[in-house]
Structures are given as structure tokens and as C-alpha cells.
Image (tube, helix red, strand yellow):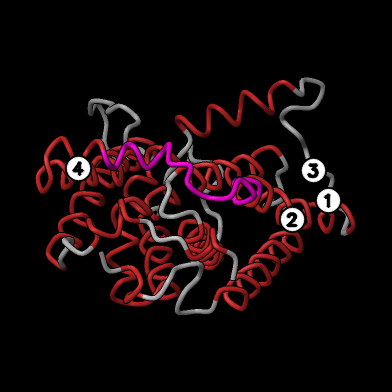
Amino acid sequence: MSRDIVMTHSNSTSDSRDVKIVDIAAFLVLTFAWSWGFWGSRILLELGLIEGAPVLPNLGAFGPTVAAFILVAYASGLGGVRRLLGRAIQLDYSNRWLLVALLLPPAIVGGALVVAVATGTTPTFPWAGQPIVLLIAFVWILLLGGPIQEEFGWRGYLLDPLQERLTPLGGGVAVGLIWAVWHLPLFYIPSATIYYQNPFLGFVVSITLLSVLMTWVYNSTNGSLLPVLLMHTSWNWAQGMFPILESDPASLTMVGLLVVATVVAVMYSGSRRLGRVADVARTE
């Protein structure tokens, strides 16, 4: 196994040992209370169930990151906050993992797009005639389309204590399932067009598989948050810029390609590792 895969991520390892079950529970309560509180009011307003209620800012997606920073600040003060922020610019790993993070999602979506075209679907591209939109959309998604609002929580706070207890594969699956359920209110908000009235079960499967792949990248990059921020951005960007969800064969193909990629990652690293060294080697 190459050296960069077996590097430990000391910044997160030492902190994760201090995250107890009660801290995990507190993170989940804060995350869901924040996000579902904002999204719940939107559901009621958009479905016409209430009138005249104040329109709250669209801040629901910040739940995981807000919860993570609150708990880290409480437990470790400003030093812990700085460490968590610093992991977003941590670069002590092979640059090829940045390519994996950036290119794997478009490769999966691109394969599904080929199936969509082959089965008679004519995709519509929001950037047609204006390719600069592709770059603008990537930056916007990174900043306001999910990654920064979520990844300091999902991978920055929750993943390490779960994979310490459940193995990396189990931790990746657990984070994926929580991540999927957290999105549930969006499936009842008409203006959330990429979620509204779409099959929730298919979303759960795809997001859980994606979570395992992101665990592999995270563990293979010494616990840096930069690759998972970019991978999350690339996944959202690819589906937005190359829409495939209107084609059932393409959607199934995307899930199939996610399964293949996940199986390859698990076989390459081992289900108990996923790019992570044995616990005894991680002890400092």
C-alpha cells in the first residue's frame, strides 16, 4: 500500500477520541433542530398550510457545520475551532487524491448521461452557450450549495468517532444514512426542485454509497477536509450541470456506477481500513 494512503490524520484522530456518545447525540440534535427548524417553516408556507408567517433566511443547510463548531468551541475553545478550520486547507497527501475527488463524481454522472441519451432522453444543459457558467456554478456550489454548510459537520466532526466505533465502512454507511435522513424535509418543499417528489429511497442509496466513497478519500488524505469539500461540490455540480434525474435508466445507471466505485474502493483498501491505518499505528 502506498505511503500516502497509510498516513494518519493526527488533527482529527486526537479530537475524535474525546467525542463520546453524548457528544454524537448532541451533534445530531443540534444539526436536525437547526436545519429542520428552518426547512419546516418553508414546508408550511409553500404548501399553504400557514399564512403570514415570517420568512426565515435560507440557512437550513448550515446545520451540520454550525453544530460542529458549537461543540468544538465548547469542548476545545478557539484552539479547537482553528484546528477544524485548518483541516480545510490541509495538504499533507498526494495531489492525485484531489483529482479523484474532483473527477470521480463527473465520471459517474457522465456514464449515466450516456445511458440517458442512449435511451432517448434529451438532457437540457443550463450552461448551453455560456460555458463560463460551469466555473461560476462550481464556485457557488462550493460556497453556498452544500459543501461548506455540511462537511465540517459530517466529515469534520461526526465521521471519526463513528468509524472508531464501527470501522471505516460502518462509519461511512452510518454517516450516509444520517446525511440522507437529514435531507428529508427538502422532499416536501416544492421550490427544492431537485428533491421535491423524487424517490427518497433512491436518494438514500446513492447518498450512502457516496458517503462511503468520501470516507475512502477522507481517510486516504490524512483527514483533510479539502478533498471532501471538493468531492461534495463536484457531485452536486455534475448533477446540476449534466442533469440525468429525469431519466429512470440514467438514474439506475448512476446508482450502479456508485456501487461499482464503492466496491472497488472497499476491495482496494479493505472494509476495515478504507485508506486508514490500523488503530494501534494511529495511537500517539
The residue labelled by disc 4 is 80
Q: Is residue 60 left or right of residue 111?
A: left
Q: Which dot marks residue 171?
A: none
Q: Residue 80 at x, y = what percent?
A: 19, 42
Q: Are marks 4 and 2 in contact (CB under 8 Å)?
A: no
- The residue that label 1 is drawn on is 121
Residue drawn at (87%, 59%), measured in percent from left and top?
119
In this rendering, is residue 121 above or below 255? above
Q: Crowding at label 3, few (<14), some or many (≥20) Cα neighbours within 10 Å?
A: some
Check the picture and name the quadrant holding the N terminus. bottom right
Name the foreground residue: 186 vs 177.
177
Label 3 and label 4: CA atoms lie apart by: 46 Å
Residue of label 2: 247
Amino acid carrying mark 1 in the image: Thr
Q: Residue 105 in the image: x percent, y percent?
A: 65, 51
* In this rendering, position of residue 181 left or right of residue 221: left
Image mark for residue 123: 3
Asked if labels 3 and 1 touch by Cβ distance under 8 angstroms, the answer is yes
How far apart in space, not on screen, are marks 4 and 2 (Cα)? 45 Å
Using the numbered discs, state the Cα–Cα distance from disc 1 to disc 2 in whole angstroms.
6 Å
Q: Are marks 3 and 2 in contact (CB under 8 Å)?
A: yes
Across and down, in percent, residue 13 comes to: 29, 60
Q: Is residue 88 above or below residue 128?
A: below
Element carrying mark 1: loop
